[in-house]
Image: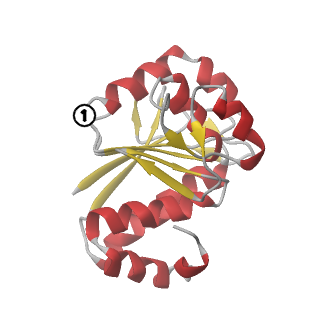
Amino acid sequence: MLTIGILLFSQVEELDFVGPFEVLSYINKIRPDSTKVLLVAEKAEPVEAFNGMRVIPDVTFEDCPALDVLVAPGGKGRVAAMRNEAVREFIIRQAQSAKYIASVCTGAFLLAEAGLLRDRQATTYHTAFAELASYGVEVLARKVVREGNIITAAGVSSGLELGLYLLREEFGAELAQEVADKIEYDVEAAEI
């Protein structure tokens, strides 16, 4: 079973974390016990997202197990999250053993602040390319960019592509396509 943690913080963009959550959880309807997806936050209290959704995390940074995959979403709250030492330390700690460290949209900045993107290729939300480049990142205008075990996805809806990319890497193209078909998502239209 692949253990996946999706980072939550105040003012996180809902689709940035719900998109990958849906895709990475849906596989269990086809092949039970393939993934365990956890919502992770600094504290065990509801997190208010950018559009008002309130979400209760499954685990805190302190009690989060070692993850196979860490997904960092973006959103308006990413600026405060970037300055939060606990967020940075959590990402660095998980990066030491995780198979993949991933981001959606401006979540790439959380990885950059943790020192994981310097001298690497990555992507983020199109209006933030120059800002991400200032971290020593070669920014590519693609939906999903992978370099080593770091996978970044572009804009808000790119979390769907990120999820499908991870499923393809871990469970094969046929199963990833079956998930895409079940959620009625056209993988061919997405440039992954």
How far across and down, in percent of the image, does residue 90 sit? 41, 25
**Measured along the vertical axis of the image, is residue 1 above or below residue 51?**
below
| 128 sits left or right of 116 in the view | right
Q: What element carries label 1?
A: loop
Q: Is residue 56 visible?
A: no
**Measured along the vertical axis of the image, is residue 38 above or below residue 8?**
below
Q: Which residue is drawn at 69% across and 47% down?
A: 125
Task: Locate the N terminus and report the quarter of the image it occupies.
Answer: bottom left
Q: Is residue 69 visible?
A: yes
Q: Residue at x 51, y 42 (%)?
A: 121
Q: Looking at this view, is 128 or 96 the one in front?
A: 128
Q: Looking at this view, is 171 or 129 the one in front?
A: 129
Q: Name the residue under label 1.
A: 97
How far across and down, in percent of the image, does residue 161 sit? 52, 64
Q: Which residue is drawn at 46% across and 61% down?
A: 163
How far across and down, in percent of the image, does residue 87 sit? 49, 24
Amino acid tagged 1: Ser
How far across and down, in percent of the image, does residue 185 sit? 56, 79
